[in-house]
Amino acid sequence: MRIRSRLLEEQRSKDELRSVNTLAAGLTAIRPTPDLLRELVQQVRSLLAVDVAYFCLLEGDTLYTPAAAGAIGDELTSRPAPAGHGIAGRIFENRHPFSTLDYLADTRISHTSVSDRQILSENIVSVLGVPLIFGNDLLGVLFAAHRSSRHFQKAEIELLTSVATHASIAVHNARLYEAGERTAKELASAHSQALEAAERDRRIAEFHACLASIALGGGTVSELAEALAAALDAHVVIQDPGERSPGPDPAPNPKILLRDLAAGAETMGRLIARKDAGFSSQDVRLLEEGLTVLSLLLLSDAAVARAESAAKTDFVHALLSPDVNDPQSTERMARRLGLDLTRPISAGFAMKPESGRAGQDDAARVAAALGGISVEYLGGWLLLFTESNTEKAIARAKALLGPGSPTKLALAPPVTGRTELVRSVHNARRAARILAVSRTEPAVEDCRRLMIYSFLFDSAAKSEFHHYVSTVLGPLLERDSDHGSDLAGTLLTFFQSGQSNAATAEKLHIHPNTLYRRMDRIDTLLGPGWRSADRLIELAIALHVRNLDRAVSGS
């Protein structure tokens, strides 16, 4: 019987040793600490046949429980506990294993509400704890606990101590592994930052070189805007001062940068940059550097434009003024502006719009396309160019301005000689004044088509015209003059609206009943026969030409 018991004991010891060796072999694999501890407590629980096995790691003065096997709740793993209390406190004092048959009743233990609550949450009665020591460093405590009273044998304590010895090495190695991973990540991050810094420096150097090349090589504002867009990987637009919308700036948007372009007190435009990914601090730095060069280019362009405008103005004055008679000087100025006065010259004219600079820009674009110049002259924009085919010039101008253009341009046929050119400019300006007030389409017209209205500018013919208008429209005009009404204007709108009452009322912004009362008054003043075909034509012509005369005369 004694021999059988001894054989069983030896077999149990061999089984435990085999289990410890298997556990130790598994602990040698390098892995993150949480995975290692979860496997460790599972093995301990199985090896010692206990209800609960858990592992506490020491960090400073606090114990954390990252892994537990057999726990029925999360109290053990969710709450850190002070290191100097409970069984762990006893173990830390002498660095030896400690066990108790009844944890809550054991007076050798320094109890705290946190540690006691953890034990109570799992209904634990008996506990065995052994320290994890690597060298002189205390890493934590490995616990085996039972929910009923249990006396842990010496062999069990030695077994758990052996497991703890292997576990301490594994924990130390895992921490080294994690520290190595952190170091590797830090090195990778530092390397990435170094690469980003190098890329940033490269971008800045390339952008500086590009700025220098554009600024010193006589580059344009559009070239610099394209370079800035490429450097920022953004969409960049340069606005002229007149294009800025009235009112306050929009609310800040990380995807949009707005910057005024100024030199001293002069504002020369605005830059708008948009980037869907948003702008980094480096992007803003590149933008600010580009703005300086951009403002200088705009200032230079403005100075050149002023000089060119002055040269054009001097040329037109020398060409058209009767007080200047220096053909050789005039020809030299023309050559500098790209015009050959030995060839036929065509003139065009566009009246200034009420607001904005669309007329100026449109005139400049058309003049450039026709190989000529545009210059501000007598309340509008004068074009001089050498295109000999008027129809071709009109077609190109229409294509450039497009339908619905607010700019109305009258073009005259080419002429030779200063006297004929002065007359051509005069006719083109007359036609432009008529075109600006007579119709919305087309945007470009041959001034010869508008010569029918030339009597508006002839004082002798005007007297006969006024007599004709008074004869045809006399009762309406007298009524309007005496009562401050505008029956003549109402009738003109009626004709322009296709003789539709509804369209006329809508265009005049009046109630239909108001229009009916006006039309009744017109019927009374003009008589019942005014709606006959002959009278309608007579009235329409008189009203239309009177309207043109008032617009041309500014009345």
Image: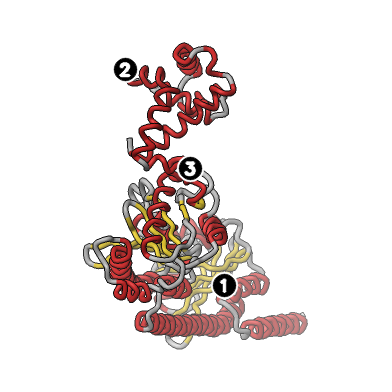
Determine crowd level at label 1: few under 14, some 14-19, many 20+ residues with C-alpha closer than 10 A: few
Q: Which residue is mark 3?
A: 452
Question: Alpha carbon of mark 2 to alpha carbon of mark 1: how far?
Answer: 102 Å
Question: Quadrant of the rendered structure where residue 329 is?
Answer: bottom left
Labels 2, 1: front one? 2
Q: Which residue is mark 2?
A: 482
Labels 1, 3: front one? 3
The amino acid type found where label 2 is placed reads Asp
Tell how many labels.
3
Determine crowd level at label 3: few under 14, some 14-19, many 20+ residues with C-alpha closer than 10 A: few
Q: Which residue is mark 1?
A: 34
Residue 13 in percent (x, y) is at 69, 83
> Is there any visible trace of residue 78 in the rendered image?
yes
Q: Secondary structure at mark 1?
A: helix
Q: Earlier in the sequence, mark 2 or mark 3?
A: 3
Residue at image location 42% in from the left, 37% down from the top:
548
